Image (tube, grey):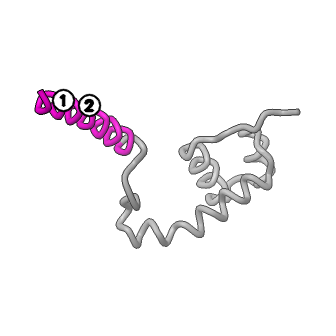
Amino acid sequence: MAKRRKFTDQFKAKVALEALRGDKTIQEIAAKHQVHPDQVSTWKRQAVEGMADVFARGGKPDGPTEAEIKELHAKIGRLAVENDFLSEGLKR
């Protein structure tokens, strides 16, 4: 059984943009990028549907990025360790 491939957001956007341009057929784009034509059509449709959101938000993402979330989790961990250390010092 074949393993599922995961595509980056940048790759999906690149393929969808190529499909939106209309220079090549969906079949040609799919063959070039080695994906199924239905997948190219899905990404193209998602790009068109999501375009209004880009202009509504002013091009800014909805929430924090994954990098920001990881950084905040690390900070929470450091603060928890510091808090535990200091509370142990107060008990003595």
The quarter of the image holding the C terminus is top left
Q: Quadrant of the N terminus?
A: top right
- Residue at screen point 38% across, 58% down: 63
Tell me the SS state at disc 2: helix
Magenta residues span 68-92
SS at badge 1: helix
Of badges 1 and 2, the one in the foreground is 1
Q: Is 1 left, or right, of 48 in this rendering?
A: right
**Left or right of residue 89: residue 30:** right
> Pointer 1 and pointer 2: residues touching (CB < 8 Å)?
no
Q: Magenta includes 73?
A: yes
Disc 2 crowd rating (10 Å Cα; few below 14, some 14-19, many 20+) is few
Q: Residue 48 — which label?
A: none
Q: Nearer the viewer, residue 26 or 77?
A: 77
| Percent coordinates x, y for residue 86 in the rendering | 15, 31
Q: Position of residue 61 (x, y in %)?
A: 40, 58
**Residue furthest toward the front?**
92
Q: Main secondary structure of the magenta part?
A: helix
At horizontal 51% and vertical 67% (from top left) the residue drawn is: 51
Q: Circle 1 sits on which residue?
A: 88
Residue at 64% over, 48% down: 15
Q: CA distance from mark 1 to mark 2?
A: 11 Å
In the rendered structure, find residue 81 and report the number of the disc placed on it.
Answer: 2
Q: Amino acid at mark 1?
A: Glu
State whether residue 75 is above or below residue 47.
above
Find the residue positioned furthest to the right.
1
- Residue located at (49% from left, 72% from top): 52
Between residue 58 and residue 85, name the one nearer to us.
Answer: 85
| Residue type at the position of mark 2 | Val
